[in-house]
Image (tube, rainbow, N blue to C red):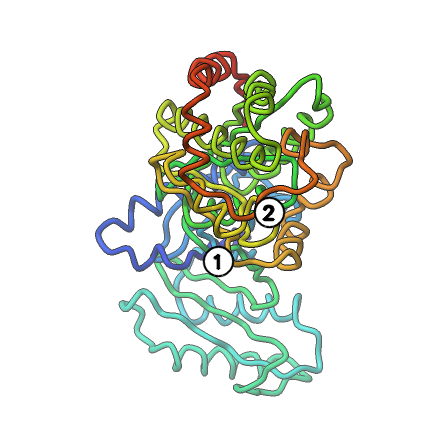
Amino acid sequence: MENTKEVLIIKYGEIALRGKNRYIYENMLMDAVRKNLAGCGDFWVHKEQGRFVVEWNDDADFARVIPLVSCIFGITSVCVAVKLSEQSLEAMQEAALAYTKQHCVRPSTFKVATKRANKQFPLRSDETSGRIGEYLLNNLDGLKVNLSAPEFTLKVEIRNFSYVYSTDAEVKGPGGLPPGSAGRGVLLLSGGIDSPVAGYLAAKRGIGLTAVYFHSPPYTPERAKEKVIDLARRLAHYSGKMRLVVVNFTDIQLKLVDRTPPEKITIMLKRSMLRIAEKIAEREKAIALVTGDSVGQVASQTLHSLHAMIGAADLPIIRPLACFDKHEIVTIAQKIETFDISIRPFDDCCTLFLPKHPETKPKLSIIQSIEGSIVELDGLMDEAIAGAEIIDF
């Protein structure tokens, strides 16, 4: 049909309620869309009264484009729509007819749902839907109206331009807030199942991520580090720009093992990781730490063990998985495609030197006393941070 073109409509959720700050969130979301679509042809993104619209100067490969956009936090759905250059009832009727012929399997029940954001258009939403529906009935055989449970719903949006699409064309997005809109946090990223999911959920609430991985060569193989790099790369698919800091933890780990009772070593290691992560957070201008702790899942994640982390870091520690069970965590990991990476058989440093009987009710005062007696610890941490490897995604 002349005077029409296929475009991508992007809908967003709660950022529409942000009042006077809404434009900040919209701009951040548009930047994320542009980043993900880089290399997808000659396109531009513009605002359209509560929507974003992506248009191409050439033909777009929508099968490739949609997955790159539908994963972005802040987006509730995306769909391919027909954009009309002429905003008139007659043009909408013709576009609706052409679209229905192409996409509706007949015989079928249908309805037309119109949203009139442009109040200058002379007909109300219900009047527009009725006139378009009547036009379809008069020009297509095998259609019946069903307003309560239609098999095919044709959507018409009247904004600065008019758009026609169907509910079948909509691909659901993750919702949440745009990447980085809530500030930056440092994610303690291991090679396990939990921490990537924690990073994903934190990013969904707008937390920009810098990840820290603690590597202990020669006790942990290079394949373990490669696994974490792959996890970080996958998280960056959702979180936008992301930095991975690889910290050599060997000297710190050996020092703690040498100076700590075996049953307390796991708690001591985690406290050192939090202390290092906080130092990196200061450098990265991050204002929170993010961990994959799930209450009671392992000995180091009992309430007593989590209490023993007090004082290891002054920044708030966000634990998105605190009340999730393992099945729920695995389900999310599979959905975001980190699970198969996480289960590769390469251990991280947390699995080294694990005691047979780790303490489940450590006392904070005793842990702090042991930590304070290891005077070399601060210097070793500073050396590890200074020699850290930086990988940007």
Where does the image place residue 144, in percent across and percent down from the top left?
Answer: 61, 87
Depth-wise, is mark 2 or mark 1 nearer the camera?
2
**Horizontally, is 358 left or right of 200 in the view?**
right
Mark nearer the N terminus (2 vs 1) = 1
The residue drawn where x is 43% and y is 66% is 157
Q: Which residue is mark 2?
A: 299
Residue 236 to residue 385: above or below: below
Residue 170 found in image quarter: bottom right
In the rendered structure, find residue 18 and report the number of the disc placed on it. none
For the C terminus, which image quadrant? top right
Q: Which residue is mark 1?
A: 76
For the N terminus, which image quadrant? bottom right
58, 381: nearer the viewer: 381
Q: Residue furthest right?
A: 345
Report how far apart the C-alphas of labels 2 and 1 lie in the structure.
38 Å
The type of residue carrying mark 2 is Ala
The residue drawn where x is 66% and y is 31% is 348
Residue 374 to residue 143: above or below: above
314, 327: nearer the viewer: 314
The type of residue carrying mark 1 is Thr
**Horizontally, is 348 left or right of 313 in the view?**
right
361, 11: nearer the viewer: 361
Q: Secondary structure at mark 1?
A: strand
Where does the image place residue 223, in percent across and percent down from the top left?
Answer: 73, 25
Q: Residues within 10 Å of mark 1 (few under 14, many from 20)?
A: many
54, 252: nearer the viewer: 252
Q: Secondary structure at mark 2?
A: helix
